[in-house]
Amino acid sequence: MFDHGGWYQRLLGLAEAGWLPVVLRDYVEVVYDQIPLDDVRPREWQVPQGETPTLPNPPPGELQQDYRG
C-alpha cells in the first residue's frame, strides 16, 4: 500500500491535523493491522468515533522481507 516514505508522510500529515499515534496505553483495544490514533484537537473540532482516520502498520523493512517464508 505505502512505501516507507509514503507511510511516514501519511503519519506526519495526520499528526499535523491533530491525530497522534497511540503505541501503548491502558484500556485500548489491541489491533494488529493498524496503529490507533488519538484526536488531540479541541473538543469542538473532534469528529464522532466512526469517522476516525486510520494509519496502517509501517511497511516491513528489508530484514523482515528477507526472512519471510
Image: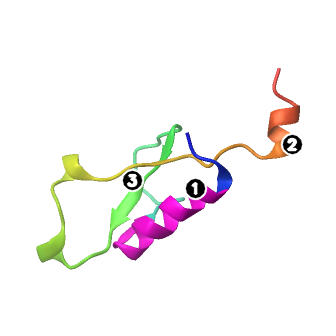
Residue under the point 87% across and 31% down:
67
Upstream in sequence: badge 3 or badge 2: 3
- Mark 1 → mark 3, Cα distance in angstroms: 30 Å
- Mark 3 → mark 2, Cα distance in angstroms: 32 Å
Relative vertical location of residue 24 with respect to residue 32 in this rendering, above or below: below
In this view, the mark in front (1 or 2): 1
Q: Which residue is mark 2?
A: 63
Q: Which residue is mark 1?
A: 6
In this view, the mark in front (1 or 3): 1
Q: Which residues are magenta?
A: 5-20
- Residue 16: image x %, image y %? 41, 75
Which quarter of the rendered picture does the N terminus lie within? top right
**How dense is the environment of label 3, judged by Cα within 10 Å: few (below 14), some, or many (20 and up)?**
few
- Mark 1 → mark 2, Cα distance in angstroms: 19 Å
- Residue 20: image x %, image y %? 43, 68
Identity of the amino acid at label 1? Gly
